[in-house]
Image: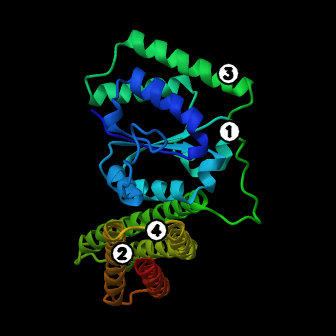
Amino acid sequence: MAKIFISHSSKDKEIVDLFKNIILNAGLGILDNAITYTSAPETGVATGGNIPQYIKDNIADSDFVFFMISDNYRKSEVCLNEMGAAWALDKNVKPLLLHNVSFKSVGWLYGMNLCAKIDDADRLDELRDEFLEKYDSCPKTVVWNRQKAEFLAKMATLTQNNTALICMTPIKESEVFGLLDYREAFDNHLDLFRQIAKVLTDEMDQLKDKTIIRTKQLSSLNTQAYSPSQAKEIIMGSAQDMNQMSDAIDNNAPKLSKHFKAAIENAIKMQQCFDTDQDTKEENRKVLNSLIQSIISAKDATIQGKDVLSSMPSMIKSQIAARNRLAKGYSTLITVYDECITEATKLLKA
């Protein structure tokens, strides 16, 4: 049976109790000994227990981690520590928005289709479907439907009585950002960095393919009936290919540097939002080292492309100009990759 960790604010105990008792216990058949929920004595820390160690161990051992997102949750340093640990350990996270919480307030979670309202009937059914796929001990459908209906009815009552959570308003620009904000910015910038890097990689691959074709075309010219105009046309085509690559570098290299630096800055601020243990830091280092190695590989490919240019013979004016322009562009791109490696190293030391 699945092991569950419920990350929540103790101030939200009333609604989280209902979720644990009705949805997890009765609806999905999960026993209390498989649930870590510190606000209930039967699922919390034993008397005299080491609370930080207990939380760390149970997150690491969990199959699912539920984030009970609320204004109280966002203001809790402990909750954000738990969230950071779950993300760092690459757990199967299930963020649930409690009553009166705005989707705008959790931008990156909602944008990745991870976040759902706790009283969304369809998403509750999806949760049950996921459990059914992995485990074979869920209660019958008729039991699930009855428990789900009871839970939704109690949620509606909470809303009507206005005893639910206070609305979590979007952050103002003048306010200090928190973990969710930094994570959203980090994801956005890193995604843009990857998209731009892919554009440049695709352009380099296309240039390589075109160069092979141009070389074959030159080799196939009949040496006995050699026509300078034919050779010139092929070489001019090669110049156009190089200029296209240069255009891609000119348009994208500054963006590449900008978004990578922004991603790293937000990653550093994310780390500062919660304390990470040595094992988690070591895992983060492995991931970051992998990213650095991929950047180094891209840099090496660019250096090879530049070396190939230096070995090309000077044939016609337009080809010489295009070759010199592309060599300069490659140098710029190499510098950008060096800057990215430097910025990533800052995060390793943070």
Q: Vertically, is 233 above or below 77?
A: below
Disc 4 or 3, which lies upstream in sequence? 3
Question: Quick one: SS at disc 2?
Answer: helix
Residue found at the far top of this picture: 142
Disc assigned to residue 165: 1
User: Which amino acid type is shown beneath numbered disc 2?
Assistant: Ile
Q: In which quarter of the image is residue 76?
A: bottom right
Disc 3 or 2, which lies upstream in sequence? 3
Name the residue located 68 percent from the left edge and 42 percent from the top edge: 102
Q: Position of residue 301 (x, y in %)?
A: 32, 77
Q: Position of residue 164 (x, y in %)?
A: 68, 34
Disc 4 or 1, which lies upstream in sequence? 1
Q: Position of residue 132 (x, y in %)?
A: 32, 25
Q: Name the residue under label 3.
A: 157
Question: Quick one: SS at disc 3?
Answer: helix
Say if residue 310 shows up in the picture. Answer: yes
Q: Mark 2 points at which residue?
A: 292
Q: Name the residue under label 4.
A: 275
